[in-house]
Image (spheres, grey):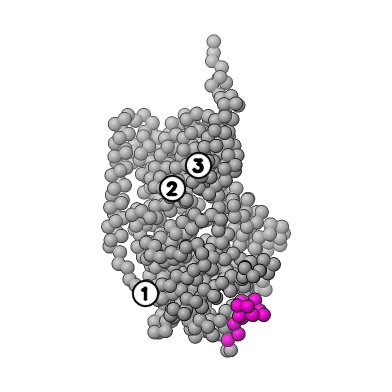
Amino acid sequence: MADNPKTDEPSLAVRLFFSFSVACGTGLLDAGLGEGRFFDDLAFVSTALLALNEPNRRGLVVVLSALLLWLAFPPLCLPTYLFCFTPIACLWQRCERPGQALKAALVFGILSFWLLTPFFRGSVPNDVWYLVYLVAMLLFALQLALVGAVVWLLRRQSLPIAAGGAALIATFVEWSVASVFGAFLVLHLPAADSPLSQLAYFVGPFGVSFFLYALNFMIVPKWTASGFAIARRVSAAAFLLAIGVLAGLLSYRQVRVPPLAFSALIVQPHHPILSLGELSSEREFRWVVLDRLTRKALADGDVDLIVWPEASLEPSEWSDTPLDNATRAPGLRGDSLSMGLNEFAGLQATSYRTNCLVGLMVRENEGDFYNSACIITLDGRRLRYDKRKLLWLVESLPGFLDLPWCRRAVVRELKVAPSVRRGTASEALGFRKRTGETVRLGVVICYEMYFPELPQFRDAENMDAYVHITDDSVFREYPSFSRYESWTCQYRAITTRKWQILCNNWSHSGIVDPRGEWLSRLPSQPAVLRIQP
């Protein structure tokens, strides 16, 4: 009698029990050790596993791989990036049909993205952000599906071809996505604190990703491998890892760290954006807190530069002409609560009396806005840098939708900020110290730090330092998010071999030396960091 092919398929009850059990364990782990929500994880992981339709070892491998990738990123930041792709790559190799490998890769990508990004789901700026989140999740899953397909196709090849080819494709896909959306969920990022990150100076950050992918895929045993062959692969991967660590340590020791060319105050207000209706005796405008912290810090001595974070001032009309008579600066409890660019110039001229770098929205051309960083120098000159990489559907539309008719017809309904325009200039912002020396700064605004190919990063030879200004208050309920910024600044320091200054609104402002080492960081509270050469 012929076997009934349906007898091997799991019953619905088995599938439900398996999916619910694994989802419970995943949700408890994420809620206990991470920043996820148990019931959100329970519903999502259960649905994903039911879609996989594999209540056996295959489903467990998918969940295990997603957890290993999650463990490599905040908040736990364990070194599982060295082998997080190994279990899922073993599964891809052993699939009988390419469709099985693709389905497992898609579920792996969706689960991983969900576990890695609770702050994106919990910090929604507008309703359209859910659409952005869904598109990003599917793109991440498709990225991993392509990697899974390559691993499956190369499963019978020799170790150099199989591991090297899969690592090359994985790195290329990762770079392609990061060049559009930013280098955020990339494999090299969690390695920022390890000696392997020093390799980025020679091969770039994505070269480090290639190295890590190669390590992951080298450990994957060939589908017909014996125990000896598996041990040989693990030994080869361990040897390659030792070489990478040794090269990174040697590179770190060879770096010459020149003194910072200027002194500075990094002012962190630890303050959300408030509207007039939210003001009270306990809650003030952001500039009021910044001014109070700045005045107190200046009592301990002058500096060459004061840095305020992104969106510190109200939107202002742009003028590069110094004021003939400085506008009277408003008092902390004066009649006027306005603090635009002209008012700040008056404050700088009458109270601070030094160079200031401040973030604000600049208005030009009948309503067009630029997310800008403005330097007001000692002699009153104004220079500005406009943000080049804007956040889709929050600051602007994607380029292919950024058309006048689309802005008029669609954006009003989506409630995004369509009038924020992309900057074009990338030259350094310069100022003179009191001694007459000129300092050249590369300025980076918020989300731009995740794009290592920006012109200011390529022009590192002409920069004395880089200043990153951000408004991270939108993620204030997810403190581990600051690790992404920390790791990214470390990589920018390593690849440029320049000082990196991070001025956040909410937490963890600090300074990174040219070796990629954090020298000082502020806690999550109103504070000022004084930097001396």
Looking at the rendering, in which quadrant would you find the N terminus?
Answer: top right
How far apart marks 1 and 3 lie (CA) works out to 45 Å
Indicate which disc residue 178 carries: none
Q: Which residue is drawn at 54% across and 13% down?
A: 2
Crowd tier of the residue under label 2, counting other residues whose Cα lies within 10 Å: few below 14, some 14–19, many 20 or above:
many
Per the image, the residue denoted by label 1 is 533
Closest to the camera, between mark 1 and mark 3, is 3
Which SS class for mark 1?
A: loop
Q: Residue at x 52, y 73 (%)?
A: 293
Per the image, the residue denoted by label 2 is 72
Which SS class for mark 2?
A: helix
Q: Nearer the viewer, residue 480 or 295?
A: 295
- Of mark 1 and mark 3, the one earlier in the sequence is 3
**Bounds of the magenta span?**
326-339
Q: In this view, does 437 lie above or below 84?
A: below
How far apart marks 3 and 2 lie (CA) works out to 14 Å
Q: Residue at x 35, y 39 (%)?
A: 219
Q: Is residue 185 visible?
A: yes
Per the image, the residue denoted by label 3 is 29
Q: Where is residue 443 in the image (x, y as percent from the top left)?
A: 48, 69
Q: Position of residue 29 (x, y in %)?
A: 50, 42
Q: Which of 480 and 114 is in front in this view?
A: 480
Crowd tier of the residue under label 3, counting other residues whose Cα lies within 10 Å: few below 14, some 14–19, many 20 or above:
some
Residue 172 belongs to the span the image colors magenta? no
Which SS class for mark 3?
A: helix
Residue 496, quarter of picture: bottom left
* Three-letter amino acid code of the residue under disc 1: Pro
Q: Which residue is drawn at 30% across and 35% down?
A: 231
Residue 337 belongs to the span the image colors magenta? yes
Q: Where is residue 44 in the image (x, y as percent from the top left)?
A: 59, 40
* Three-letter amino acid code of the residue under disc 2: Ala
